[in-house]
Image (cartoon, helix red, strand yellow):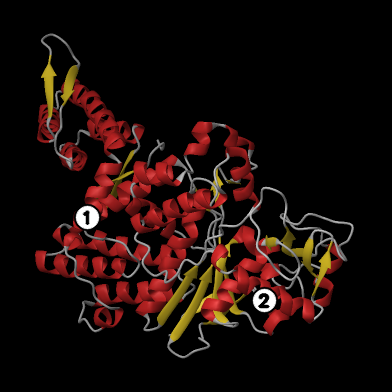
Amino acid sequence: MAICIFDTLTREMSPLEPLTPGQVKLYVCGPTVYDDCHIGHLMGPVLFDAVARWIRARGYKVEFINNITDIDDKIINRSIESGEPWDSIAQRYTDQYLQFLQELNIETITAHPRCSEYVPQMVAFIEDLVREDKAYLADDGVYFDIQKQEGYGKLTHRKLEDMQAGTRVQTQTSLRHPADFALWKNAKPEEPSWESPFGAGRPGWHIECSVMSSELLGQAFDLHGGGDDLKFPHHENEIAQSEAHGDAFASTWMHTGLVQYGGQKVGKSDPRMQDPAFRQQFQARWLLDTYGAPALRFFLLRSAYRRPVEIEPSTLEAARTGLMRMVKSLGELAENTEQVTLDEIQERALSDANAAHRENFIAAMDNDFSTGEALAELFSLAQEARTQSPKEKQISLTLVRDLGRLLGLFQPGDLGRLLAAGQGSQNELLEQVAAALLEVRSLAREQRSFETADALRDALLQAGISVEDEAGQKNSSANCNAAQTDALDQILDAALAARLAARAAKDFTTADGLRDALAGVGINIMDSADGSSWMHSPGGA
């Protein structure tokens, strides 16, 4: 089965048919490097790294370009405000961005071209457009004449007569149309500039990507990606100037969803961003330190790339704890450095159930890179492995690991990274769980369910938490000095066993009390025919 992709331009699913057999060329717009990275800067690299990994797994060679915009009004304004040279600012934030990509295990990007490295090529590109009467000189630079390009607006289905100037377009009286956009901006005092036939100046925003993509991938290439907010004016203008320059451009367009909080889009103009605590939640460094790079990667892959991403502490922490439990279940398999190909995985003789999970995973990824559905198959397979024989379990978990690694997950050292990132929240949750179990233990003692009370005490002790019963007092206290990194798992697994024993003894008051107490601290117990399990859902109760 061929990989099928939703094309934003046609609004239809279409098979991946590379222009060059056996090779796929991908261009994804990168950051403007004038400030600290936020989650929006990381989404594209993570999501398209998974796309590129899967295309590669399917046997194609992938060339993946992710540019750096290091010439821009925002960088220049920051330089003027601070007195720091513009190129020093750009270099610092470029280094930061590349460091974050390394932490996130982004391995498929083949080049990070910088705009400042391609100014001569941009000048030549603009000269061609002026020569073909597709661009003209205005008072403050060179502009593209959108009325000269047939089909302008086809990506976003906008009509020319309804268009106004784009976000980064400054309307001038010398423009032929309000939506004509700058290809070259005349030099201003204190701004960086380059010589050109149009006078000293610097390139406009949109021309940068058209030139770098054509220089590195050719005039026509296979896939162009970016955030949904880049459709207009940036990608619309890229298409216009590139097709005016050489007819063909990107064959397929892919766009990722935007960042949301509380169901509302988050952007720089969002009034909520005035709150430092709110703003911090979206900063890349804070997210990586708080939840860990493996969890952030997993979090971004849990849903379809075209959907908005809801960024909230509860969803991020749930992703971290869910991934951590999965990595723990893999055990030594997760630390093994073995990498296998999709072909090798497909050649394995598997049980019918495991083969079905494998085929469902592959089908999900072939269907517009549906990482959320693919990961659901892995978690379902891991859940089934819990009740299998040791030999069958090893086969199932090896399949989980190998399929996950095709998407950059389950890497050696991930468990340590997850534990280090979440140590503070883990300890806090452990204390909350201990307090909840103490309450239930007191209830069990009141009900004279001493076996259950003792089981809960033993669960706490096993996790390194001592219990002190004060003479003549109904309540007990706990001293939480747990040193084990897996103390939370131990205490909750033992609590599930105690609840099961209480239900078997028909002590439903204690069993229900245990369930409700844990739900109060965000631990949900799920009962099934195969037994009970727990899941951490922060904020839920």
Task: Name the foreground residue: 213 vs 188.
Answer: 188
Measured Cα–Cα span from mark 1 to mark 2: 48 Å
- The residue located at (53%, 72%) in the rendering is 27
Give above or below for 129 relative to 331: below
Q: What is the x, y in percent for residue 541? A: 40, 35
Q: Report which residue position mark 1 lands on.
A: 413
Q: Report which residue position mark 2 lands on.
A: 124
The 10 Å Cα crowd at callout 1, few under 14, some 14 to 19, many 20 or more, is some
Give above or below for 254 relative to 386: below
Q: What is the x, y in percent for residue 493? A: 18, 43
Give amino acid for label 2.
Ala
- The residue located at (56%, 77%) in the rendering is 215
Is residue 210 at all visible to an observer of this figure? no
Dot 2: what SS?
helix
Q: Nearer the viewer, mark 1 or mark 2?
A: 2
User: Which is more N-terminal, label 2 or label 1?
Assistant: 2
Check contact, mark 1 vs mark 2: CB within 8 A. no
Is residue 514 at all visible to an observer of this figure? yes
